[in-house]
Amino acid sequence: MAETLHVPAQEPMILPRMGNRIWTLSFASLGLALILFVPLAVLMAGPAGVAPDFAARLSPPGWQHWFGTDQMGHDMLARTLKGLNTSLWVGLVASTCSVLIATVLAIVSIVGGKWVDGLVSLLVDAAIGLPHLVLLILICFALGGGPVAVTLAVALTHWPRLTRILRAEVLQIRQAPYVVAARHFGRSWASIAFGHILPHLLPQMLVGLVLMFPHAILHEASLTFLGFGLDPTRPAIGVMLADSMRYLTAGKWWLGLFPGLCLLALVLCFDAVGNGLRLILDPRTAET
């Protein structure tokens, strides 16, 4: 009877978890390497992709031009890499601003009292309820377009969901024994916010920053594609996709295929990096 009730150790469960962890971290490392390769490749490309070459206009993919050329004779590989690099910088600045806005609102909503918390909740609900793309277009149009307008439009529309997540974390931290003890010792909420709450939020902020990157990049490309974003003369994925629409029916398929695939690959790289960071920083999975 004892042999029948004997339950072996949970090794069969541990092995699949370790395997999934290794695969997740491997994909995250590969995604990070590909992301870092983009600005390095732009430096190596030099003026390629910017200077026109009318003798090679609309050339199909080949050994000389791996991604082909566009209507101006630009090398599409170099131009695509420079467009991805532009998206990276826009996404970095916009995501950082959004994370800062979300962190400030989450902390202020808890330490500022009930009426401040209600005001922040109302602001978050109103921002989530508005159509995202329409709000992006209105902000970008009001600011006159360009890189600064796109960056501000993306930054001002991507903070609400992260604010809710950080606010829930702050609610839990506020009831922690060390926070209660700090209040009993007479420390102000501002001191507790910087000394106790903010360090606890850093993992969530970092993961939120990385996971917000794909949304920022896609929305930057969407605004540029619709004509409300970056200057049409500069390398940008949205500009290339918009220009390709006039030539796809003529059989120039490479003008839209390769920039779109590279944008998708960049988004998947950020998703892989975000999953890896979440696996490392989440206390529930960091030790498995």
Image (cartoon, grey):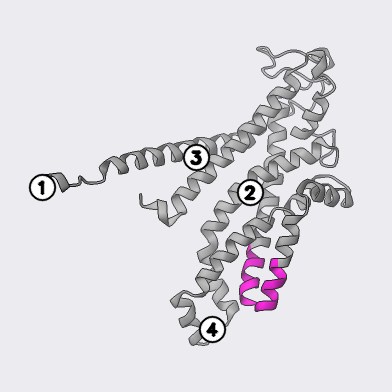
Which one is in front in this view, the residue at disc 1 or the one at disc 3? 1
Which label is found at residue 187? Answer: 4
**N-term mark: 4 or 1:** 1
Q: Which residue is mark 3?
A: 28
Residue 280 % position (x, y): 44, 50
- For label 1, the crowd category at 10 Å Cα-Cα, with few meaning under 14, some 14 to 19 and many 20 or more, is few
Residue position marked by numbered label 2 in the rendering: 212
**Residue drawn where x is 77% and y is 29% of the image:** 241
Q: Which mark is residue 1?
A: 1
Label 4 SS: loop
Q: Position of residue 103 (x, y in %)?
A: 63, 63
Label 2–label 3 contact, CB within 8 A: no
User: Is 110 colored magenta in this rendering?
Assistant: yes
Report, in whole angstroms, how far the alpha carbon at label 4 lies from the one at label 1. 61 Å
**Mark 4 or 2, which is nearer the eye?**
2
Which image quadrant is residue 189 in? bottom right
Residue at mark 4 to residue at mark 2: CA–CA distance:
34 Å
Measured as percent of width and height from the top left, residue 70 is found at 79, 20
Look at label 3 and name its amino acid.
Ala
- Stretch of the chain drawn in magenta: 103-121
Amino acid found under the numbered disc labelled 4: Arg
Judge left or right: residue 276 versus residue 11: right
**Which-is-in-front pick, marks 4 and 1?**
1
**Tags 4 and 2 in contact by the CB under 8 Å rule?**
no
Neighbor class of circle 3 (other Cα within 10 Å; few <14, some 14-19, many 20+) is many
Q: Is residue 196 visible?
A: no
Query: What is the spatial separation of the Cα atoms under label 3 and label 4, in whole angstroms?
Result: 41 Å
Residue 146 vs 69, above or below: the answer is: below
Residue at left offset 67%, top offset 41%: 88
Q: Earlier in the sequence, mark 1 or mark 3?
A: 1
